[in-house]
Image (spheres, rainbow, N blue to C red):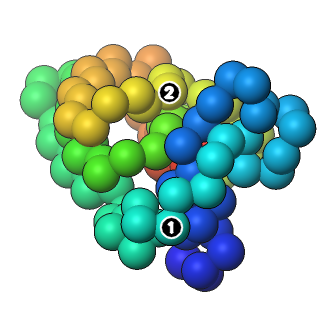
Amino acid sequence: MQLKERIMMSADKLPTLEGKVKSGGRLNLLNAFLYRPPQISISKTNDNIEINTQTTFGDYKIESSQYLSNWSTFTNIMGTNNTYTIAPDVSTMFYRIKGVK
């Protein structure tokens, strides 16, 4: 991840700055240097997939796609430790996690 991206992702989101500045908040350089990418673990039980996420800060989303195109948001991640259970309706599904700017 580039330094500029780290700085933008570590901004303190403020509703009063949303839409006015590119980061959507106040820059927080300490967070930029303490930034750690989200940690993800995935397990399968029966027909369900369980995704566990650990983040230091920032907002993320899990997206899904059947053919690695036309990605759609499965859920937004708020907070630092989250668990999501997915019951796919097709045999092959791809998931990715992205930062929300």
Q: Quadrant of residue 6?
A: bottom right
Q: Position of residue 17 (x, y in %)?
A: 76, 34
Q: Nearer the viewer, residue 39 or 51?
A: 39
Query: Position of 93 compared to 15: left or right?
Result: left
Q: Which image quarter holds the N terminus? A: bottom right
Q: Is residue 65 visible?
A: no
Give whichever of 23, 39 is nearer the camera: 23
* Identity, as a three-letter code, of the amino acid under mark 2: Asn
Residue occupying the far left of the picture? 45
Is 67 situated above or below 91?
below
Q: Which of the two discs, 1 and 2, labels the residue nearer the N terminus?
A: 1
- Regarding residue 25, the answer to whether it shows in the image is yes
Where residue 29 appears, as percent x and y from the top left, is: 50, 67
Q: Which residue is mark 2?
A: 76
Q: Amino acid at mark 1?
A: Leu
User: For the point 74% across and 25% down, which residue is it?
Assistant: 16
Whole-percent x, y for residue 52 in the image? 21, 39
Residue at coordinates 13% horizontally, 25% vertically from top-left?
Answer: 46
Q: Is residue 50 above or below residue 34?
A: above
The answer to which of 29 and 79 lies nearer the viewer is 29
- Foreground label between 1 and 2: 1
Residue at horizontal 59%, vertical 36%?
A: 13
Residue drawn 46% across the image and 45% down it: 58
Question: Which secondary structure, mark 1?
Answer: helix
Judge by depth and name the residue closer to the eye, 30 or 98: 30
Q: Which mark is residue 29?
A: 1
| Number of numbered discs overlaid on the protein picture | 2
Horizontal side of 91 relative to 16 (left or right) equals: left
The local secondary structure at tag 2 comes to: strand
